[in-house]
Image (cartoon, helix red, strand yellow):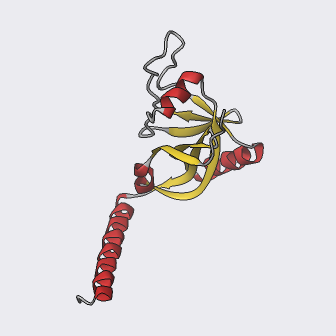
Amino acid sequence: MVKERGQKVIVSNRRARHDYTILDTYEAGVALVGTEVKSLRAGRASLADAFATVDDGEVWLRGLHIPEYERGTWTNHEPRRTRKLLLHRKEILRLIGKTRESGLSLVPLSMYFKDGKVKVEIALAKGKKAYDKRQALARRDADREMAKVRGRALKGRY
């Protein structure tokens, strides 16, 4: 059997980058059952309502929706069950300290296959205020307009 190589993105949470300021990111493994992996290989998952918590020295991913495997039988999984994230002890201790002291959140940014194993990129994030979101949108529009003008200038049309 050929081993998988490389990275294949299953799902990404674009909304998280809009709603939160990302301070630090971590790559974590996920403890899954067989039908969940099969459903993920079909590209079916949603990180829309997902978040991570630290309980009793372990990190848990909550709200992740992995639909039931179509060809599964009575062994099928529950779509919104709590899943354990696999991190090194030092990383977990660092996350415990950061989330307790400064009120930061753990938000999943993306889920992907890396060399055949399912990984989740979680971020230590701080919620943005409404005016921060408006500033980010205005900055992005201004950057897009400058790039457009720069492109025209390079082509000699401006």
> Measured from the top left, where is residue 155 in percent x and y?
29, 86
Tell me the quarter of the picture where residue 58 sits: top right
In the picture, which quadrant includes the C terminus?
bottom left
- Does residue 63 show up? no
Residue projecting furthest to the left: 157
Q: Quadrant of the N terminus?
A: top right
Q: Nearer the viewer, residue 38 or 20?
A: 38
Residue farthest along the top direction in this orientation: 74
| Residue at position x 47%, y 24% in the image | 79
Total labels drawn: 0
Position of residue 131 relative to residue 62, above or below, is below
Instruction: Look at 43% across and 20% down and name the residue there.
Output: 70
Q: Position of residue 112 (x, y in %)?
A: 54, 43
The residue closer to the viewer here, 10 or 48, is 10
* Residue at image location 49% in from the left, 11% down from the top: 73
Res 89 → quadrant = top right
Please determine whether, in this image, residue 107 is positioned above or below residue 139: above
Residue at the extreme front:
1
Q: Position of residue 105 (x, y in %)?
A: 54, 47
**Can I make out residue 21 in this image?**
yes
Relative height, residue 136 to residue 97 (above, below): below
Q: Quadrant of residue 142?
A: bottom left
Left or right of 155 on screen, residue 123: right
Q: Position of residue 141 (x, y in %)?
A: 30, 70
- Give me the residue at 50% from left, 33% from top: 40
